[in-house]
Image (cartoon, rainbow, N blue to C red):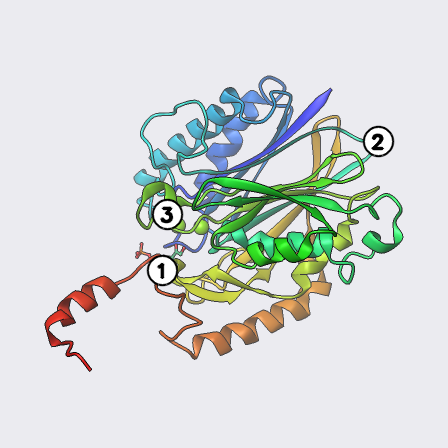
Amino acid sequence: MKLTLSVIKADIGGFPGHSSMHPALIEIAKRELAKQKGKLIKDFKVLHCGDDLELIMTHSKGEDSKQIHKLAWDIFVKGTAEAKKLKLYGAGQDLLKDTFSGNVKGMGPGVAEITFEERKSEPVMVFMADKTEPGAWNYALYKMFADPFSTAGLVIDPNMHGGFTFEVHDLFDNKKVMFKCPDEIYDMLALIGQPSRYVIKNVYRNSDKEIAASSSTQRLSLLAGRYVGKDDPVMIVRCQSGFPAVGEVLEPFSFPYTVAGWMRGSHHGPFMAVGFEDATPSRFDGPPRVICAGFQLANGVLEGPADMFKDVSFDLARKKANEIADYMRRHGPFEPHRLSADEMEYTTLPGVLKKLEKRFKKI
Ligand code: F6R
Ligand code: MG
Ligand code: MG
């Protein structure tokens, strides 16, 4: 029987400010999901990354299930009521609509879902980020599934040697394109090197078209037409036996590469892989964080989570991230620390230009 793993997340209020999560919201989510365990869902786990509430669920309803999405939506609505009572910051921030209309996509929350036949042993990694955007996964997914200098299996595992196909979405034009790799990596890199626009949605194994990875791709600012916070994406990756090994899936995060987000969704900064306890972006509202929950699935039961980035082997990456954060911060309001004008989520620029309109003289 096919199993679906759904990760649905939203920022429904921060504590304090945008830095972390109030325990009351976690409790509400756990309580509500527990009521459905063994009924609508097989199993669940609730985590947070910064100010984002992360619902991880297994079930047999398939992707885009109205029942599953409504379950998540109702939890976010209940959580928002509590967030308002506690006067948490930005209560209900990611709920862009008042009433549920069948699917949380386009309503604010982020979603990553994959459906598959559970293998003899099914290790999966669930990545969750705060203070960045969906394109933040592009670099990591490329390294995992297309870079032999990162993933040794692409060269030496016969089950991976055939490569992977990437489904890339254009978030501005609502279009998608498939790239069969390694044949088409140069074309693909031309696009995914612009992660604000082109985002890797899914990855499939070439030999049998099996789903390997999926990410959340909504952009709140594009949905709402105004600044409503960064999208703080999630991603699911299947591991081992013809997919990258757990260690190959984690390896890209040993380098704190630059992502967009951080303070006011308007700055570049290092992507810092941390343990669950350290998913509390505070310095300059950051730097952007990523956590990874590792699971072994056992007939839909989520054995875990294992806190994958807690491992000391990521200490050096964190140290480097802090050094890069220092270096970037010294730029203050200068690019490329500050995002370019069209990418900034907050801007006074049109207002400043308007004010100066009459003072500008022809040169
Ligand atoms: C970034 C983020 C925060 C806020 C910042 C200002 O995604 O959520 O950095 O942008 O704290 O927040 P406001 O405008 O609500 O005071
Ligand atoms: Mg927030
Ligand atoms: Mg957030």
Q: Determine which quarter of the picture holds residue 202.
A: top right
Q: In screen coordinates, is 296 left or right of 75?
A: right
Q: Residue at x 34, y 37 (%)?
A: 96
Could you tell me the amino acid type at mark 1? Answer: Asp
From this view, report whether residue 201 is shown above or below residue 254: above
Tell me the crowding category of disc 1: few under 14, some 14 to 19, or many 20 or more residues within 10 angstroms, Cα based.
few
Residue 13 appears in the rendering: no
Could you tell me the amino acid type at mark 2? Answer: Lys
Image coords of residue 271 (percent x, y): 56, 62
Q: Determine which quarter of the picture holds residue 235.
A: top right
Could you tell me the amino acid type at mark 3? Answer: Ser
From this view, report whether residue 285 is shown above or below residue 160: below
Q: How many marks?
A: 3
Q: Secondary structure at mark 2?
A: loop
Are circles 3 and 1 on residues that touch, CB within 8 Å?
Answer: no
Distance from Cα at disc 3 to Cα at disc 2: 41 Å
Residue tagged 2: 120
Q: Determine which quarter of the picture holds residue 310.
A: bottom right
In this rendered view, identify the residue nearer to me: 44 or 98. 98
Distance from Cα at disc 2 to Cα at disc 1: 48 Å
Residue 54 appears in the rendering: yes
Is the C terminus in the top left, top right, bottom left or bottom right quadrant? bottom left
Q: In screen coordinates, is 357 left or right of 46?
A: left
Is the N terminus in the top left, top right, bottom left or bottom right quadrant? top right
From this view, report whether residue 28 is shown above or below residue 148: above
Tell me the crowding category of disc 3: few under 14, some 14 to 19, or many 20 or more residues within 10 angstroms, Cα based.
some
Q: Secondary structure at mark 3?
A: helix
Q: In screen coordinates, is 328 left or right of 44?
A: left
Residue tagged 1: 342
Residue tagged 3: 221
